[in-house]
Amino acid sequence: MKTLLAAKFVAATMLMSLLGPLHAQTAPLSIHEQGSFAVGGSVTSSAGTFDSLKPSPEGQTLHGDHAYVFYQVPENARRLPLVLWHGAGQSSKTWETTPDGREGYQNIFLRRGFSVYLIDQPRRGKAGRSTVPLALTASADEQQWFNQFRLGVWPNLFPGVQFSRDPQALDQYFRQMTPNTGPFDVEVVSDATVALFKKIGPGVLVTHSQAGGPGWVTAMKTSNVRAVVAYEPGSGFVFPQDELPAPMASSGGPLEAVGVPMAEFMKLTRIPIIVFYGDNIPEKPTANPAEDSWRVRLAMARLWRDAVNRRGGDVTFVHLPELGIRGNTHFPFSDLNSREIADLLSDFLKTKHLD
Amino acid sequence: MKTLLAAKFVAATMLMSLLGPLHAQTAPLSIHEQGSFAVGGSVTSSAGTFDSLKPSPEGQTLHGDHAYVFYQVPENARRLPLVLWHGAGQSSKTWETTPDGREGYQNIFLRRGFSVYLIDQPRRGKAGRSTVPLALTASADEQQWFNQFRLGVWPNLFPGVQFSRDPQALDQYFRQMTPNTGPFDVEVVSDATVALFKKIGPGVLVTHSQAGGPGWVTAMKTSNVRAVVAYEPGSGFVFPQDELPAPMASSGGPLEAVGVPMAEFMKLTRIPIIVFYGDNIPEKPTANPAEDSWRVRLAMARLWRDAVNRRGGDVTFVHLPELGIRGNTHFPFSDLNSREIADLLSDFLKTKHLD
């Protein structure tokens, strides 16, 4: 059944690729409404009384730990908006123009009639005000990200990888990274996203990588998350606390599951979920720590799918190479074949009556 | 002559306020193209050779100090785009939805047919990767900003101030602040904006506050800046280095002018410039350091206008209360009367044949 669905995805994809692009690239976007706001967050105060004539840290406040959201509502929008949540080291930029200059998910799904909400999670990007300090180090680390994001093994791209060979694309890719401005905190970031769903009502949550874990937490905290689409969730796989799988060792470090009460876990069985993983993930242990970290994530994600589906859940698990879709990196939604990847999402939303 | 222009502004404003809003608020935005990119910046490298199997800081790179830009081009766009550059503690959010939920300059000028480029300057917002480290302190400081941005004298708003009494507006206002992720550096931020103008061609540069100084530097570095619109420039007033005015003392600290070679200064005489200041700026010294800092800025800005215009320049200086427009804060473009303020800008662009 799941395989049949996958086969349908591929057929639909090929058809839409033939028919779609020319019109999609040239027609104007008709935007009914667009804007931005902060949502969620907290306020801290320092002791004392503020004196306007002799200002000091005394008696002052700090509003922080909110998310920043930029939204666009197209004319005649579909019922449910897409809420797009970036991964580690990224901001909402992830969903905008691709590193090689094509339209990202923001535009693609606006053109397909969806309202699109782009998050900068608390302590990232334009939501930079953190209630907790952090020292930024300006560390050179891009060769590690190149490997971790599975563009290749530095300095070589993987053969057939869905990433542009234009050096400008790699330059843009590195520059779309932006640091945490406070410690990463699953509760802080999920609370802000819950606040967003309370503000906007029901929608579909689309997560990437590091947002995968807090994405499950968000879906457990509010019933306004009507489906989750997770691209390459990398950590924070939640299991019933009495059925926690053992940590998985890899040359990139151990991967541990997260235990939650059964009643919370069961909430994940009540919504459709789809999980996507790209290519160049080894099935057997390897000495390359970046690649090996994905081996165990893929394995953990399969255990997680089984744990949810065994209890009546509806998790569709898509390992893209099994559909014959090859070369995808850790960023399938902005890879060279991103329209094909977007078509898989459209077909999922249609099949689940979410569009 | 300048006063006549100002009177025309007011008349045009009143007419547009009567005719404009209903249509402007409800018509869809027709966007020919939108997207984002990084521009400018540099690359640093750590010594050694990167080993994919045993990654360490050795032999890695860091792409940083670029600006992040989100742009929208409306259908049938006017010839020159507006490049909008935020002030201290702010990001491109400054130009989006106002704290009380109305459309900001981004939407207002899209509706008036201008392409709009919103900058996050290097080391701010979604351009967070800095090549220089910085320790973030998460300091409570909002009562100082409340005073410095001339909303009032904490905890009281100024009588008649153009800022919403809704507590949610103040909450949003505080949350649109976001910290530097590296040291503020005039050369770094102006170089990135110069790179932007090289990429997009001629345009009008709109600066706020801290961007005022680097805005003049940008206009001296590239002839693609065809006009500058500066809201409440707060520092970095450039003068011929042989004619530097003395530092101006205030209870908020001294304000010093910046000297540049005459040939550079003369470049500012070749483009139209308009400078806006709001209300509640004292003309005489006061013990309130926030207010007094604006007293000397206003005085320095007048000297600067005279220095440019004396050499054949075209600086229009607008102190809004002198036009009978009262209650504006440090953020006239997002104040309650922001459409009236936008109309002044539209009229300037029309008068100077920039639209």
Image: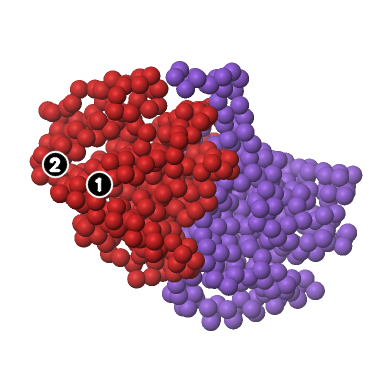
Chain colours: A purple, B red
The reply to whether residue B133 is in sight is no
* A276 to the left or right of B43: right
**Where is residue A317 shown, x and y percent of the image?**
74, 63
The residue tagged 2 is: B309
Residue A200, by quadrant, is: bottom right
Read off the chain for label 2.
B
* B69 to the left or right of A263: left
How far apart, in angstroms, are the residues tagged by discs 2 and 1? 12 Å
Residue B180, by quadrant, is: top left
The reply to whether residue A26 is in sight is yes
Secondary element under disc 1, as helix, strand or loop, is strand
Q: Amino acid at mark 1?
A: Ile
**Where is residue A35 shown, x and y percent of the image?**
51, 56
State which tag comes first along the sequence, 2 or 1.
Answer: 1
Number of residues whose C-alpha sits closer than 10 Å to that of mark 1, classed few (under 14), some (14–19) or many (20 or more): some
Q: Residue at x 25, y 40 (%)?
A: B217
Q: Residue at x 49, y 74 (%)?
A: A24
User: What label does residue B274 carry, if any?
Assistant: 1
Q: Residue furthest left?
A: B311
Is residue B30 or residue B224 the one in the foreground?
A: B30
